[in-house]
Amino acid sequence: MKGSTAQFRLRRHPRQHALLLALLLPALAPGHGQAAAAAAAATTATTAAMEEHAGMSPEMAPAMPGPRRTTMQVSLGEVPLVREDGVKVKLADLLHGPRPVYVDFIFTTCTGVCPMLSANFAALQRRLDAAHAQADLISISTDPEQDTPARLRAYRQKYGGGERWHFYTGTAQADAAALRAFGVYTGDKMLHAPVTVFRADPAAPWIRLDGFASADDLYRELSPAKTAGR
Amino acid sequence: MRAGRLPRAAAGLLVALCLAASDLAAAALAPDLVARGREIYLHGRLGDGSPLQGVRAAGQAPVSGSDAACVNCHRHSGLGMTEGRSRVPPITGRYLDPPHSLSSDKPDLPYIETMRGVRMPYTDETAARAIREGIDANGRTLTPLMPRYGLGDADTAALLAYLKSLDRPVEPGVGDTVLHFATIVTPEADPVRREAVLATVRQFVKDKNEKAFLIGPTAAMHPSGRNVESKMLQRIPRRWEMHEWVLSGPPESWPAQLDADFAREPVLAVVSGVGGPHWEPVHRFCETRAVPCLFPNVDAPLERPDDFYSLYFSGGVLLEADLIAARLAERPGDRPPVVHQVFRAGSAGAAGAERLARALRPRGLRISDTAIPADATGEAVRRAVAGGAPGEVLVLWLAGADVAALGEAPAGATEIYASGRLGGFENTPLPASWRAHTLMAYPVDLPDRRAVRMRYPEDWLRSRGIPITDLPAQADTWLALSLLNETLKELIDAFIPEYVVERLQDGLDHRFITGYYPRLSLAEHQRFASKGGFFVRFAEPTGAKVVADGSWMVPDGP
């Protein structure tokens, strides 16, 4: 784990702010498909540029401790969920496709932890699109009565959710059952720790990542051996 | 930024002297600078209008604009929060640079559980360094969860000015041995409801003050016992003083009355109370004067998700309109030729009717509204519902007395919706001939499912000899006061209005005593704690037995 306590000065020129803004705005626009692929490369460059202009190079930015990685059992039941576009789907059906799947847990009025989780999913989505890699991103609400399909749609649009990133809600009971299946149910939306769950394919074990997994951490799960020397 | 050493004196004098001596004084802060800082803190907008930019650890996405705003983690109060295992510290001026008394090196501050331990106080320079570079006052790196912000000198100064402005010189309604609250009654309040609610409020406060150790003391720190590090707290129960602000005259005159009431008796919070269709002047008072207004008994609350100070148990008739709209959307068969709504002009029912009409018109449904004049007799109600074409949907936004006056159901009326909130839920006096065809919107839990939770308020009301004349309002009143009491107990001595709101909403999910409602939950941008409802039918021609038609549903909103 890298750490740095190097002092660094922040350059403070008004024109820098305008430049940052110009660089950053395209990265903030929601991207889909091809546009996302193009934006992905731009965004990586933008992030680097932004950190550079902020007087910090990526190596010097403080490191976040990496996520804790464990395997877990998940027993998926016939839990009835509702997607952000209103489509009804059972949890087990959602997760028996062949593609790798990532699952995280958010609520739309969350201001602390969830924006970070969703921003990381957004960055992961861009990386997947850029690499033409296929994986499904699933975000399940921990506040199902507030997070109606309409609210999930707005939240998904804000983070640029593409064809393979969907949001799910349901009745209070169904949602609790889904959260229990993944071992993250607490009964209190404020008592949530940042958790992302991953499965490479239906035959593979479920991996639980505790902590703020970056897009890199998440992407690396696709093929740990191949991406190790990245 | 540091205050000089000062002689120990009464709290108020001490604060005043601190203010005079130090440049933490809010009075010394230019209002423009504070306003500029507020834009950054609440909205992530810099002085030149561009978005605030923040960078987190390598690999984490940068943040910009409202996502970068300090309020997201440090909250409106500036006192931080706990979310999962993330502990966000308080950052108002006095927590960054604590005032010290002569006799103790320990800071003299209300206890916030995420406050950092002993460290060097911040200066303007080290605070700027923390925000821009993530180095704290002791020279240590801040948690990587805290972004490093790109802020120029002027914006940094503005933000620091705002953080200093968050400390009120004196917290309203907080005394050494007493906490002041108010309950508001508007002239539109139903007289029976008003008496029932006030009787409940008065008895709860009486119980709290007399039987402090049964209901639970509101913990307070005696000044000499204040010792944050050892957490040995000397508790003195503070008694509650409840002021009744009874408004009179037309709604336009209420803001001035409320301002005068608040100036005369500053309160920590307004709780419960009763109103009618015009609640907006009160809601706006709470928002502009920064007074928490906790769960008033109003059937037509205001839906302002971005406001902060007013909390409601339910959307009332607004929620019922959404439930009916959703039910009509799912309804099989042909679209009805017309939806006919009946309500009293200017009533809460009118607000429900307006919301339902707005939801249905875009679907091409024809809406016909009959607004019965406020002073008309029951005969006018009967006339309003008479006639009607076959296939027409009838929606009754009527209070109990008008429902009782309905007379015989019209022959052609086969699809009728009624407001449970206005009618009295299962006690709605719906005449027998109406019952077979009426679905009642029921935005509370079913009687048998809420029985256990309701035992607490019902037993308490009976044991105190309070006549139960409006159980829904009385249970809501008891619940509002209980939630306030529980929240205050957790605050130790941090009786700060915004913090009361934040802690109440954060702690709501895990409470199981929720009265009429199956679940209560609140957060930023959520001001209605209960979000769904049933539809019920009366099981018998007379009496209060109801059965659910379908399951609990949460409508998707307009």
Image (cartoon, coloured by chain):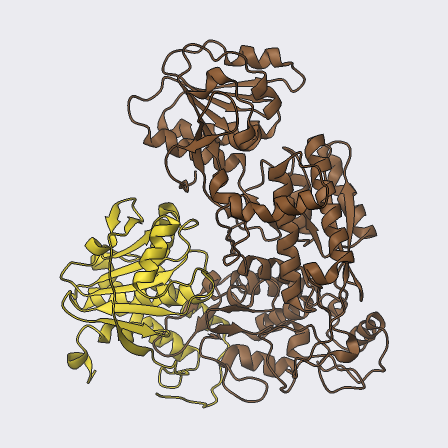
Chain colours: A yellow, B brown
Total number of numbered discs in the rendering: 0
Q: Using residue B162 as the reference point, say whether residue A181 is left or right of it.
A: left
Is B414 rendered above or below residue B427? above
Is B229 rendered above or below residue B545? below
**At which x and y percent is residue B33?**
65, 66
Q: Quadrant of the C terminus of chain B?
A: top left
Q: Quadrant of the N terminus of chain B?
A: bottom right
Is B545 rendered above or below residue A157? above
Q: Using residue B473 as the reference point, say whether residue B206 is left or right of it.
A: right
Does residue B351 appear in the picture of this structure?
no
The quadrant in which residue B12 appears is: bottom right
Q: Using residue A208 as the reference point, say whether residue A51 is left or right of it.
A: right
Residue drawn where x is 48% and y is 89% of the image: A7
Does residue B11 appear in the picture of this structure?
yes
Residue drawn where x is 59% and y is 85% of the image: B137
Viewer-nearest residue: B17 or B148: B17
**At which x and y percent is residue A151?**
39, 49
The quadrant in which residue B391 appears is: top left
Q: Using residue A45 as the reference point, say whether residue B123 is left or right of it.
A: right
Viewer-nearest residue: B209 or B386: B209
**At which x and y percent is residue B439?**
43, 27
**At which x and y percent is residue A182?**
30, 64
